[in-house]
Amino acid sequence: MPRAPIDRLLVAALLASAGCYQGAARSSGSDTDASSDASASASASAGDSDGSGGDAPPSAVAPEPLHRLNRLEYNNTVRDLLGVTLRPADAFPPDNATEGFDNLAEGLTLTPSQMDLYALAARELAEAALTIVPRLAAHVGARAHAEASGQAGTAFDWGWSMPRGGGGALNFTIEASADEAITASILAGGDALGVPTPEMGLVVDGVEVGHWIVSATPVEPAVYSVALPLAAGAHTFAITFPNGYDQPAENIYNSLVVGYLDVESEATVTPPGRTMIYVCDPDAAADPALCYRTIVTRLAQRAWRRPLADADADALSELWSGLAAGEGPEEALKLTLRAILLSSRFLYRPSLPGVAGEDTPPGLVPLDDYTLASRLSYFLWSSMPDDELFDAAAAGLLRDDDQLRAQVQRMLADPRADGLRAGFASQWLSTRHLALHQPDPATFPSFDEPLRAAMIEESERLFVDFLGNGRPIGEMMRPDFGYLNDRLAEHYGAAPPGSSELVRVDLGDDDRRGLMLLGAWQTATSASNRTSPVLRGRWILEQLLCIAMPAPPPDVPPLMPPAEGATIREVLEEHRQNPTCAGCHDLLDPAGLGMEGYDGVGVRRELEKGLPVDESGAIPDGLAFNGADELAALLAEDPRFVECLADKLFTYGLGRGPMAGDGAHRLALHDALAEAPASLDQLIEMIVLSPAFRTRSEGEE
């Protein structure tokens, strides 16, 4: 079947039978009202320290808006669905960050160009998941390789024209991880005038293993192949032109053009995804078509994260049957998988209601069991539910508090909980920002890529450690441990642990430790060539205390570069003389100025412009401090820090911004945290057990 009709059939399948959600194709337009409500709610409560969001009753839980998978969720989902190592979403445009996170439904719009990228990804994923491939496979384009490595010869339209004279060769290196029986194939063409037809040789490790007379022409090249054994290890391959001849004066010559070298082993590898998808063997089945129906419906059920209605199963089976008639069953399965991956049921997560029970609070309905399973798995794993979570949803176990707690603890102990590090911690601790930040090499010559990587890992491993060690959250400010390698220790002026890899080290009162002293956020919130108390102050207020700062006025004058000998503190004092600037800077500057004991890449310093550094600072409510250690001690005892982290995890876990009615549930969370210090995993349990996480308002469409 030609490609164009297949593509049209896939599109028809998506529109007619793949179950598009109402309004999904309208990008963010269908969520306009919800977004406006969220913005209004956020604005109304920006000055409320309790984040109550008004007097909405506890029963007013807003539903999660239609939620598109973000890049991390897409990559993790196809990994767990298909067993692939591809990360196609890395090539997608960055997701919009809302409320500091890129997993919030309001920011996850969809454009036609992104839909094209989804189509390309679906094609690549279907091939990677289902195609049985050689264990050793190498494809080397002759022209690109020769130009990149500076080999003799000249460029030709589709390949590389070999040097004449009998001494030229095109050299490659190919490594085999095991002993293999391989086939080496070369695309080549040549011509001759007055001399013999060109010959071509293939030499492996200095021994000629293939020799051909190349009768094919450059206009219609052919493939020349030879089978041979190849031992494990690295091998040199050389394509030769032994009878190359060129006599311009006599007008006689021959030429040889090489397009590529392919090496493929006889031994093959079956991708893990194929085993996951083929839940029955059509070749051994009494009714192969029925087996394929089972395959496609089971695949769609996992991809769409809920059981299929009979009509959906019928439609997918008919799609496969129609494609199989022209393409064969294997290719039809790949195309059906592409349709499944392009469905809005895969790309989006809706908030669907279930059936209310006796224990459901008035005015609320519980989330559908499968919706709750997905909300939980995308919170903790940034990925789809596994079979155990699907089974718990099918049995209705997730409605039971103890069962839900057990699932949270199981999932946090699973390696897939790395999704919390990659999704939540990287944004909360600004390690994603550090990955893009470029300190000025003239000002900070010691900053390099190994240091950047160590700073990022230090911050994220601190979060992961607290996720599993059961310590109170407040201890994140002054823990008695940290993560260092020799490179980071040198940067911090600490004792090296004797390891190039980051290791957990015990720390004392006088050591650099804790969240406030992490070099990652200190560097990410600096200017390229100096510290930025403004950015550091904003980070402290917004990330640690949840004090929302308004956008700067449109006509605010820029901060002037420091005059010769002037400190950044003096520059900011002058900047605050402007009443337009003072409103925000009176809040921002004191918090950030207290961090001036650390330069633009987080190195401890005592002097600035030859003057002793003034580390005096303050956070709102008149709490003064001198330096990062004192600020850490203040925040360790300040309930606002733990409450702020709770609010951020609450927002991240629900996958949407603040809405009317959330305030009561956040306050209930704060009250529970005030009764007894909670660990990070206990806080996550509290959020999952909250009505805001498990229910939605009755009557919402």
Image (cartoon, rainbow, N blue to C red):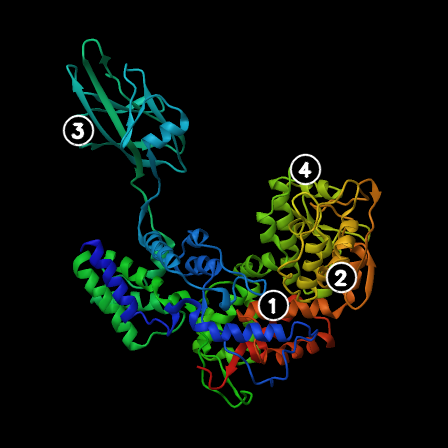
Mark 3 vs mark 4, CA separation in Å:
58 Å
Residue 42: x and y, percent? Answer: 60, 72
In the picture, the disc for residue 79 is: none
Q: Residue furthest right?
A: 612
Judge left or right: residue 44 versus residue 301.
right
In the picture, the disc for residue 216 is: 3
Mark 3 vs mark 1, CA separation in Å:
66 Å
Judge left or right: residue 666 versus residue 159.
right
Q: How many marks?
A: 4
In the picture, the disc for residue 649 is: 1
The secondary element bearing badge 1 is classed as helix
Q: Earlier in the sequence, mark 3 or mark 1?
A: 3
Three-letter residue code for mark 2: Asp
The secondary element bearing badge 4 is classed as loop
Asked whether 32 or 244 is in front, the reply is 32
**Res 4 seen here:** yes
Report the residue marked by disc 2.
586
